[in-house]
Amino acid sequence: MTLEMQDLARSVVRLAESSRQEVEVYTIKQRSLRVEVTDGQVETLREASQTGVGIRVIDRGRLGMAFTTRLDRESLRDAVQLAAANAQSSAADEFNRLPDPKPVEPMALLDPKLAQLPVDVKIDFAKKVEDAARGYDVRVTKVRQASYGDGVYEIGIANSRGVDVGYQGGYCSTSLMVVAEEEGQAETGWTYDFSRSFEDLDPVRVGREAAARAVEMLGAGSLATCRVPLILAPDVAAEFLEVLGPALTAEAVQKGKSVFAGKLGEAVGSKELTLIDSGLLPQGIGTAPVDDEGVPSRDTTVLEQGVLKTYLYNTYSAAKDGVESTGNGVRPSFRGALTSGIRNFYIPAGKLSQGELMGQIGRGLYVTSVMGMHTANPISGEFSVGAGGLWIENGRPVRPVRGIAIAGNLIDFLKRLVAVGSDLRFYGSVGSPSLVVEGITVSGE
Amino acid sequence: MHIDRDKLAVVLAVASRTGSDYADIFIEEAYTAQIFCEQDRIERVTAGIDAGAGIRVITGETTAYAYTNDLSLDGLKEAARIAAAAARQQEGDVTVDLRQRHPSFQLPIAISPETVAIAKKVGVVERVNRTARAADPKVRQVTVSYRDISQRVIIANSAGSWVEDERIRTNLSVNVIAIEDDKIQTGYESLGGVIGFELFQQQNPEELALRAARRAVRMLGARPAPAGRMPVVIAGEAGGTMVHEACGHGLEADLVQKGISVYAGKMGQQVASPLVTVVDDATLPGKFGSFRFDDEGTEGQRTVLIENGILVGYMYDYLTARKDNVAPTGNGRRESYQHKPIPRMTNTLILPGRDDPQDIIRDTERGLLVTRMGGGQVNTANGDFVFEVSDGYLISGGEIGEPVRGATLTGNGPKALAMIDRVGGDLGFAIGLCGKDGQGAPVSDAQPTIRIPELVVGGIMEEDQ
């Protein structure tokens, strides 16, 4: 069976006029729905369909790109010509290459039920999320954007060297923000979950989790500036990993933009730290038979017990280093440039529960939220972020704190990792269990 | 775009057929050009067209929204049917009579980027790259990114309003990496606005390159910022991230109406120091957040939010204004046809006061001077906010001391604004891409030099000996 988008990609490749040009076409067609509920009523219902085409032309090493949302033959021909014209303005680079075709294993990424689910079932799901949050505690006063969303997509990738692939996929997700209030103080809790199949998404668990996070912060006060062990909750740890990801791409290393340059084979983190990137992870949101330039997906161990094993490669950076692509060619959308990035990037689960981790540190801070993570510098590794969480004494949480900040350097952070929890959870394409890091400055009073 | 009035009226009638209170359509054709330079060469040039329409149907408290890339009459009618069906009301026949509205002010563009040859744009990018690289031998990598966008829109609604507009934005950013031994630091600068290629005549892009390069090199020698609570002077040249986070978001009417803003229910009350007046102004020529019409067809305007410390206004889009029974303030914005409009800031500023900026520093015994702010974030429900200091110095005895690196400042919006005790007579702008509910919006923020007696500096404690 070939797919509509695969046929489209293949036909656009043929529109190139000159045989000296190498052409790649990426096509995507997606349908999505999102429902948001407030006070048991549908506040917003969004249904969308979109089709887009992204084109790369390499002309004697020069790279030009174009995209369009218009699918008539003339517009597509114009787009190919525009990409070819743009190539004339860039500098030649011998490593600008397109991948050769390789055998591709098909994958089942589309839960057929997802496409057929009636909208009422989806609205009910969002209502259940809201109800679960409100029912958790009387101090829960507001629920914002209790939501359910899903999407199905079809992607085609073809190039003039013979790559010709297509696949379909689907996902569903839910999120909400909860406000809890007591004695004039308002605190918030947020959570998010996703799955490839509707059955695996639990509205009650998600609603209660966000509510619990808001309620546990009630009465939060500040903290004196100190240096203590931290336990990062899985979603906070995942935010740190998201900053770390780009620095582990070969592209960043080759461009002198990575603190990991020249460190292959060296210990860059503590022995407790293993980091994996996988395009094959069952149920992963970053899972697909191929990456965004049609290179078959694989599993890559990036750090093993703290030792840097490899960088993440796309076709360009692999050609430059004389190695094989690890299937990490990534496009942000059909409009964006093909760069390199993570697929499913995670720290595997360890053995200790959250309670055991608290027992192990005795006294410190359990960080449940951070603010301003987008200001962390992926090149220097430096970060300074606002934080909130629970103060731990004698291995147990004793009071909530906020209005504090934590700062340091990610590389330093990796070396200070002393324990890994068993509670691995994915937030989109990044996953982590709770992590214990020692000796981090907490700024407060 | 070839979409005539009759076709629009038919589509709106389909959207309104189910007895909705309100329907609107937003049709967009966006042409972008991007140039990316790294490794001392032009790595790639991209251009593209993104065209589509979003149709919104409002019934009571429910908004249904559908979007499509299919701009044929059938495609638009199908999207209208989907949105209308989602709203689920009784069917009835509706006719819509559209009258075109024209802007009462202009945001002139001197040189439309579409008329500028790609080689000329590449020339600016190469000049910035060369200047940054030549600034210091410690500069090892320079990334220059140029982007222009011409967004043509048609916005019409079931109340009969019909607007056609074009928004042209041009911007350029430079990120410099400096390396010394095993230390690596970066310097980032950007400029841009609702402006054409004349941007580079009005502002010298090479100065931008030098500022970024010098900062990256200076930070190599800077020590980490101290940790803890201290007085902070934010210079006018630092930009306006603080005002954007400390009160801007909390004054957006959707967050206020949902009760997740610390500024909810405070209209007419003192929420800031009497020295502080905050406005949001979409009418400023050339600024990044400006427009003649917002994305719902309401004219851009200047809205006073806080006047001498008293809360006097919120920022409204159509839906939130309807709920509060007031006129929309022209703050209904959407990232593209794929998104629904929500209340957003445009150009947000603290107006200048009377103090000499130099005096403010001189009168500060000890603290932190911020000369460049980076990104920020706020929890509107409790008012806690953070912003990044990308260029900072210690103040000691009223003198500017040594530079410090990488700190985030943490505070609480109403508390920080109430504490402001000095406001300078200067004013400095910075541009940014503001994120909210998964939508990005180009904005600018500005402030004079101000002093906040207490903020928490997220720094590093000296290692225990």
Image (cartoon, coloured by chain):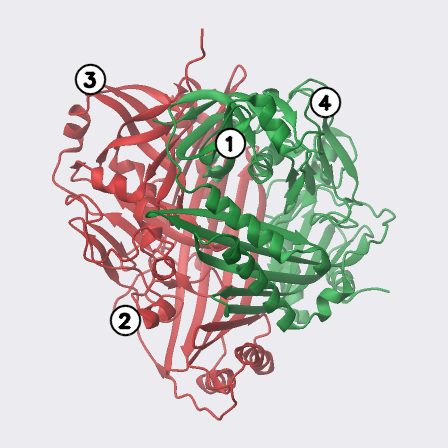
The chain containing the residue under callout 2 comes to B
Q: Is mark 3 on a helix, strand or loop?
A: loop
Residue drawn at 56 percent across, 79 percent down:
B76
Is A272 left, or right, of B138 in this rendering? right
Query: How busy is the neighbourhood of tag 4: few (under 14 within 10 Å), some, or many (20 plus)?
Result: some
Q: Say which amino acid is labelled 1.
A: Pro
Q: Distance between the residues labelled 4 and 3?
A: 49 Å
Same subunit under labels 1 and 3? no
The chain containing the residue under callout 4 comes to A
In the rendered image, residue A124, in percent from the top left (x then y), is placed at: 60, 68
Q: How far apart are marks 1 and 3 (CA)?
A: 42 Å
Front of the two marks 1 and 4: 1
Front of the two marks 1 and 3: 1
Q: Say which amino acid is labelled 2.
A: Ala
Q: Mark 1 points at which residue?
A: A397
Relative depth, front residue between B341 and B319:
B319
Q: Mark 3 points at which residue?
A: B397
Residue drawn at 62 percent across, 33 percent down:
A354
Q: Name the residue under label 2.
A: B327
Residue A154, quarter of picture: bottom right
> Disc 2 or 3, which lies upstream in sequence?
2
In the rendered image, the vertical position of residue A125 relative to residue B419, given as above or below: below
Residue drawn at 21 percent across, 41 percent down:
B418
Q: How far apart are marks 2 and 4 (CA)?
A: 61 Å
- Looking at this view, name the residue that lies furthest to the top: B465
Q: Colour of chain A?
A: green
Q: Say which amino acid is labelled 4.
A: Gln
